[in-house]
Amino acid sequence: MSIRVFIGGGPCPPEEAAIPVFDRGFLFGDSVYETVGTNRGQLVFLDDHLDRLARSAERIYLRLPARDEIRRAVRETLAAAENPESRVRIVVTRGDGGVDLDSAAAGQPRLVVIVQPLGGPSSELREAQT
């Protein structure tokens, strides 16, 4: 089981994933996210989660990447992780913008997808302690 992160165009191991310090999601929490699970390896209610992501983004005037781009990133990262069951976190930040309170200073939105085994590190830690 593994964790994979989609950032900058493709999936990678978490230790290779990086967000620039001037990303508004990092500086100001200027982002939206959704978490999706799998059941028998299939994403559960992905379209419903993407609808809610879109509504959240609309409320803060954040432009999302195309829905097909988000779906592709989720599926590629899920396939790269090769977990029997996964938790998928989809994050979209407003992108780089410097330390400027004006959100209009931001560039392109940044898409990040994090796939980890369902149960996550906390269950692995509990097993190691017993």
Image (cartoon, rainbow, N blue to C red):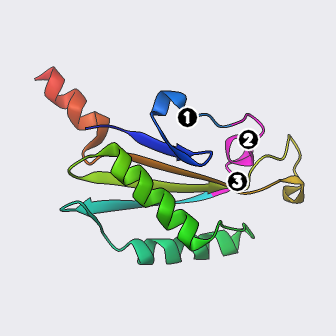
The label number, if any, that marks residue 27 in the structure image: 2
Asked if residue 117 is positioned above or below residue 39 in the image, the reply reads above
Amino acid type at mark 3: Asp
For mark 2, give the secondary structure.
Answer: helix
Query: What's the CA distance linking mark 2 and mark 1?
Result: 17 Å
Q: Are marks 2 and 3 in contact (CB under 8 Å)?
A: yes
For mark 3, give the secondary structure.
Answer: loop
Residues drawn in magenta: 20-31
Is there any visible trace of residue 116 in the rendered image? Answer: no
Q: Which residue is mark 3?
A: 30
- Let me know if residue 85 is in the magenta part: no
Q: Which residue is mark 1?
A: 17
Task: Pick the quarter of the image with the C terminus.
Answer: top left
Is there any visible trace of residue 73 in the rendered image? Answer: yes
Q: Residues within 10 Å of mark 2 (few under 14, many from 20)?
A: some
Which one is in front, 108 or 93?
Answer: 108
- Residue in the picture at 71% in, 57% down: 109
Amino acid type at mark 1: Ala
Which one is in front, 40 or 130?
Answer: 40
- Let me know if residue 21 is in the magenta part: yes
- Residue in the picture at 18% in, 62% down: 40
Find residue 94 and report its horizontal and vertical position in percent. 73, 56
Query: What's the CA distance linking mark 2 and mark 3?
Result: 8 Å
User: With 80 as the anchor, is 90 left or right in this view?
Assistant: right
Asked if residue 1 is positioned above or below residue 55 in the image, the reply reads above
Task: Pick the quarter of the image with the N terminus.
Answer: top left
Query: What's the CA distance linking mark 1 and mark 3?
Result: 19 Å
Q: Earlier in the sequence, mark 1 or mark 3?
A: 1
- Residue in the picture at 85% in, 41% down: 98
- Image quadrant in which you'd find residue 74: bottom left
Q: Earlier in the sequence, mark 2 or mark 1?
A: 1
